[in-house]
Image (tube, rainbow, N blue to C red):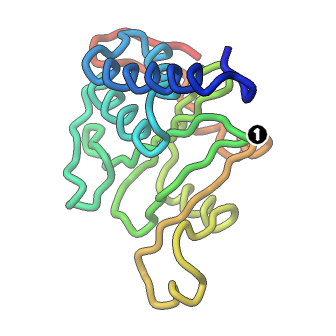
């Protein structure tokens, strides 16, 4: 176990190990989704695990990926345009970043990963997410003055455990993946 009192050599070895793990993860993803989530948290940087998890989610569920230049979310679920967001539980909350209410989408798929690396998926209609952003969200970038004329603001929202009641009705109880494997929560 590496601690603050570990030697520089031990700390460097850990960094090398983590870097190697990130490279290995690119070529050899675990088949088990929970194991994959653990590896993403362990071996990838926060700014890159969101996209990695999103791409795996799209592939595992047979969704149609949307080109980001269309500004219609991340994928299509039959005829619905969906924005995918994922967050690991940290400091007693989940943080969702770069929420873009100006995008023409139908739904947000929000994956919240708890401290035991179990996930729950919430499929929240856009209108409901807009209400949540109005009540709990705040602008993610810039100052109030710099954003006065900006119509395409990105928001962030921090979800605390006591807020889950506000979205509980959107919890997906059963997920059917493209290979017909069902997952129950």
In this rendered view, identify the residue nearer to me: 109 or 48: 48
Secondary element type, mark 1: loop
Residue 21 lies in quadrant: top left
On-image quarter of the C terminus: top right
Q: Is residue 149 left or right of residue 52?
A: right
Q: Is residue 16 left or right of residue 130?
A: left
Residue 141 location (% of width, % of height): 52, 70
Q: Is residue 23 above or below residue 160?
A: above
Residue 55 lies in quadrant: top left
Residue 60 location (% of width, % of height): 31, 22
On-image quarter of the N terminus: top right
In this rendered view, identify the residue nearer to me: 65 or 106: 65
In this rendered view, identify the residue nearer to me: 170 or 46: 46
Residue 36 lies in quadrant: top left
- Residue at coordinates 57% horizontally, 59% vertically from top-left? 156
Q: Residues within 10 Å of mark 1 (few under 14, many from 20)?
A: few
Q: Is residue 77 above or below residue 137?
A: above
How many discs mark residues in the rendered view?
A: 1
Residue 118 location (% of width, % of height): 59, 20
Q: Is residue 151 left or right of residue 178?
A: right
Q: Which residue is mark 1?
A: 92
Extreme-right residue of the structure: 162
- Residue at coordinates 29% horizontally, 57% vertically from top-left? 72
Q: Is residue 105 left or right of residue 148?
A: left
Residue 163 location (% of width, % of height): 74, 46
- Residue at coordinates 53% horizontally, 64% vertically from top-left? 155
- Residue at coordinates 46% horizontally, 38% vertically from top-left? 45
């Amino acid at each position: 176990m590496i601690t603050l009192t570990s030697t520089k050599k031990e700390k460097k070895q850990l960094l090398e190990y983590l870097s190697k793990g990130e490279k290995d993860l690119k070529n050899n993803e675990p088949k088990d989704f929970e194991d994959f989530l653990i590896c993403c948290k362990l071996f990838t940087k926060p700014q890159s695990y969101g996209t990695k998890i999103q791409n795996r989610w799209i592939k595992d569920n047979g969704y149609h990926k949307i080109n980001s230049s269309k500004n219609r979310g991340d994928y299509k679920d039959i005829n619905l345009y969906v924005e995918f967001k994922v967050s690991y539980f940290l400091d007693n909350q989940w943080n969702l970043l770069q929420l873009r209410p100006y995008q023409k989408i139908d739904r947000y798929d929000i994956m919240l990963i708890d401290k035991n690396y179990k996930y729950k998926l919430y499929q929240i209609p856009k209108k409901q997410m807009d209400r949540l952003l109005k009540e709990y969200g705040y602008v993610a970038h810039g100052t109030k003055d710099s954003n006065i004329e900006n119509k395409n603001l990105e928001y962030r929202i921090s979800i605390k455990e006591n807020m889950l009641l506000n979205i509980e009705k959107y919890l997906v109880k059963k997920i059917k993946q493209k290979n017909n494997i069902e997952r129950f929560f």
